[in-house]
Image (cartoon, grey):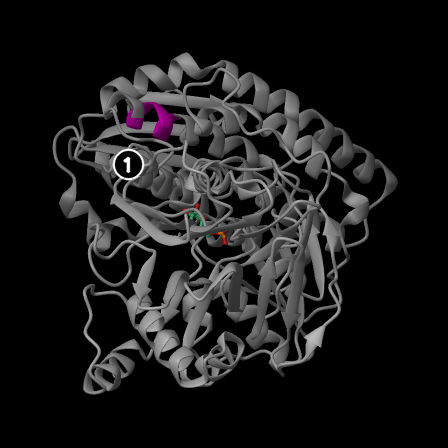
Amino acid sequence: MCGIVGYIGKEKNALKVLINGLEHLEYRGYDSSGIAYILNDKLIVKKEPGRIMRLKETIDFNNDSYIGIGHTRWATHGEPNKINSHPHNSEHITIVHNGIIENYLELRKELTNKGYSFKSDTDTEVAAVLLNDLYKKYNDIIKAIQEFKNIVKGAYAIAILCDKEKDTLYAIKKNSPLIIGTSEDANYLASDVPAIIEYTNKYLTLDDGSYAKITKDKVEVYNNDNKLIDLDIKTFDSTYENTNKMGFEHYMLKEIHEEPTVVRRTSNIKTIPNISKYKKIVITACGSAMHAGLVGKYLIEKYANIPVEVEIASEFRYKKLFIDKSSLVIAISQSGETADTLEAVKIAKKYGSTTIGIINVKESSIAREVDKVIYTEAGREIAVATTKAYLSQVEVLALLAYKASKEKDLEEIKKFINDLNELPVLIDTIIDNSNEYKLISKYLYQKEDIFFIGRGIDYALCMEASLKLKEISYIHSEAYAAGELKHGTISLIENGTPVIGIVTDKTIADKTISNLKEVKSRGAYVIYVTTDKLAKKGDFYDKCIILPDINPLLQPLLIIIPLQLMAYYIAKEKGCDIDKPKNLAKSVTVE
Ligand code: G6P
């Protein structure tokens, strides 16, 4: 989702810093980009639809500029064309924005009545025009910002340039991420750390409702009550990861290959709290993180004997909730910035529930909002479709279920720890087997629909496998509870329709196998995904993927790997832009 960069410094290399910063935010997903900077006392705006490469071609990097703002746009209001791209300018004020101005139509009407006109379809241009109008009223940007905050509803992180103050950047933040980077010779604005990490490891986060005035050697931050506050400057972890592809063709493949290391890093059971005292748990998240939550539900209910509900965060926000002080709400998020998940946590806190975050990005908004954070140690994930972060979320949930399970004897503990230690090796062997999945993918990539079926925890895995496939290959796919198939989906099965059946739970294996027989007899091309112990000969499948058995708590961590790899190879056969699938964003900072 939209990315923001801002630079003001002693060195006149703003253009390079802005473009470099935007390139480091590409992972968030975008469909156009733009920058605004001051050159020889004049404001220049450059913007282009499509990839940053197109924007770069319009820029003369020999030009010296010491101040500018940049943006990658993920379209929400108006199509991704040049006019709708940011920055947006209104007379004295030029801005870039991440978020959604909810009352923009109303404001646009009021401003039109005042005589202003608009070029774009965006909510952001309305914010620019409003800020300019307020600036003209007060002749003071800080005052304009204060009134802007009272008028505007919604979420916004905004970087502002004013043509009357060519040596100052301003910024406002509410419910969308924004950090300020500081250094001896320059100060920066960014949606996320990677945009500025090459230049500084000192930063400060802005609280909701706060705003800042930034010059090349000074940062002033005002809180929601308009009070100037002390700066709480933090230091990034100096081991912030290198993010090149390390010889892999795509980040997604590189990230799948990192999974053995990731599960090893995440497996520290000592950092896992014991949640056995809670009578009820609600897991809230979006996308793959929600699917990880579904796996967690099965594990926690089965092993810790606590009822668990999983609520999509965008639903959680607007439904009647049955939580109170005795409930635990677990929010899962790779980015730690997903707007709906963040809001769900705030709501849960209002109900008095304890909140735990399972988060990948350190110091992100959700990590700071929850009562207790458990970091998944997946490292930076660049591919929009998550793989290693999802896996680490499932691992943390398995560890939570294990820790809260009934009294365990020493032998059992030893066995679990052994299995946990064995996990990276087994994942490695599955990845080594990639040729098998490549061959199946060569058969599947021309198909128009692919179905996944399973029961219980296997159904939760089907949902993630199906999502991964459709996200990056654009093949229509559905995950279905195997027993529900007969109530509708079976009518879609034709000769050769691929149905992938996941069977890992021996108590219900025969039931799912019956369902596979039903589709097979209607012409489906069946791929049976199972474990060594449940592998069997039979005429109910065309292909079989057999995975090693492990402690059932950890089994889901093995099952998903070939399905991630198959999604990857199918998308590759189709020639898709695997790391940046169309219309998707890695960090969804609007609701
Ligand atoms: C986007 C990403 C998904 C991710 C979801 C939730 O849709 O493309 O991969 O699962 O957001 O993101 P989060 O950062 O909260 O895990």
Q: Is residue 583 magenta?
A: no
Three-letter amino acid code at the position of disc 1 = Thr
Please indicate whether residue 101 sits to the left or right of residue 243 in the image: left
Q: Residue at x 56, y 55 (%)?
A: 336
Image quadrant containing the C terminus: bottom left
Where's residue 7, x and y in %?
Answer: 53, 49
Where's residue 521, x and y in %?
Answer: 19, 33
Q: Residue at x 39, y 15 (%)?
A: 436
Depth check: give the residue in front, 45 or 247.
Answer: 45
Q: Secondary structure at mark 1?
A: loop
Where's residue 524, x and y in %?
Answer: 20, 32
Where's residue 275, x and y in %?
Answer: 73, 61
List the residue tagged with mark 1.
Answer: 58
Q: How many marks overall?
A: 1
Q: Residues within 10 Å of mark 1 (few under 14, many from 20)?
A: few
Magenta stretch, main secondary structure, is helix
For residue 217, above or below residue 116: above
Report the span colored magenta. Answer: 566-571
Q: Residue at x 55, y 76 (%)?
A: 347
